[in-house]
Amino acid sequence: NNSNNNNTRPVISVLKYSLACFFIVIIVSTWVAMSELLQGLEDSYNKPNFLAYIVHASYVLVFPLWIALEKWRCRSESQTESLMYKIKSFWKWGSILGVDYTVFCVVWYLSLQSTLASANNAIFQSSCAFVYILSIPLLGERFSIKNGVAVLVSIGGVILVTCFSDKSDGKSSALGYIYCLLATVNYGLYEVLIKKYGSQAQSPKEQLCDMTLFIGIFGGAVLVFLSIPMVIVHYTGFEVFQTPNYDQSMMILLNIVLDLTCNLAIVFGITLTGPLFIAVGSLLVIPATIVVDVVIKNSLVSPWMIIGCCLIVLGFGILHANELTCFSSSKEKKAKRLTE
């Protein structure tokens, strides 16, 4: 069920590809909104461990949505009886990835305190390179020069944008960069493992239902397995819990909704297409954020930042064109076989 050892990459259908592009739009929109929201939340409620825990534990709230989707999708009693089997099949990796993802969110947050903002952003956004590298041994993806060029072009754009937008005077330390690198590699691994151990169904409808369950298990594991560590963190004084006020609570609630929507879009997109397409597509957050800053905050943008944004869009465009080429080639071969 969970293995993907094919040496040939399956071609994505038009429907799946279109849905994945739609999910990239959702990822970019919610990510930009979260980045603006968190700037205010971090100033007034600096509790990274609690925030990471409560946000990701809240993923358990998608269970009612999954039940509703399954009742809508399933038409026979035999299908309904298979739901418990799906829960058992997703429990292991849903739990592992949920706890792992939450812990490394805290690790990345800690890296922000001892790294330059530009360097931290450039390192973390380079996770698409690790996705590309890890997809070859773990997913059996073939090496593609076009995909490699797309990744390099996108990372080049990220470096240009971050280097010419840094205004940080903070101190840097080797430990901070180690934290950032660990979080980056882990995020790339997370995206690849979502594809490997997520839904292996063929129909988009069933894939979306399966991954809703996967995210629900993700949240349930965080809620159960990280509750005791959170108590320890509080009583040791490492991060003393403080009840948020009304405004802070509303900001946390909004962040939960945005983060859940974003992560659902990420896992849906990865399942429908692949981790590399979603990882590079997610880089469009950078030019989108710059556009928002220019329009709303009247921020100044250097020519190098504009060039960097263009490179990011170009990198995604190369991937986009490669996917369309693969689909067209597959369609032509199928038509040729039918006429023979």
Image (cartoon, rainbow, N blue to C red):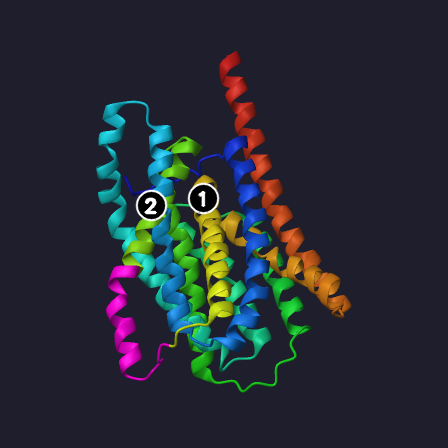
- Principal SS element in the magenta part? helix
Q: Residue furthest top?
A: 339
Which image quarter: residue 35? bottom right
233 left or right, relative to 252? left
The crowding category of the residue bearing disc 2, from other C-alpha atoms within 10 Å (few below 14, some 14 to 19, many at least 20), is: some
Residue drawn 33% across and 57% down?
Answer: 97
Query: 174 or 21, which lies in front?
Result: 21
Whether the residues at callouts 2 and 1 have beta carbons within 8 Å, the answer is no
> To which residue does mark 1 refer?
268
SS at badge 1: helix
Q: Amino acid at mark 1?
A: Phe
Q: Which residue is mark 2?
A: 63
Q: Residue at x 54, y 25 (%)?
A: 331
Point 35% across, 43% down: residue: 64
Image depth: mark 2 or mark 1 in front: 2
27 relative to 76, above or below: below
* Above/below status of 319 relative to 253: above
- Tag 2, which secondary structure? helix
In-front residue for pair 247/222: 247
Report the span colored magenta.
223-241
What is the x, y in percent for residue 298? 76, 68
Q: Is residue 167 magenta?
A: no
Looking at the rendered structure, the number of numbered marks drawn on it comes to: 2
Of the pair 225 and 135, the residue shown nearer to us? 225
Residue 294, given in percent of the width and then of the height, sits at 74, 64
Residue at horizontal 33%, vertical 27%?
A: 74
Vertical side of 292 occupied by 174: above or below = below
Give the residue type at disc 2.
Answer: Phe
The location of residue 338, given as percent across then percent down, is 50, 14
Quadrant in the picture for residue 88: top left
Question: Can residue 138 be seen from the camera position used here?
Answer: no
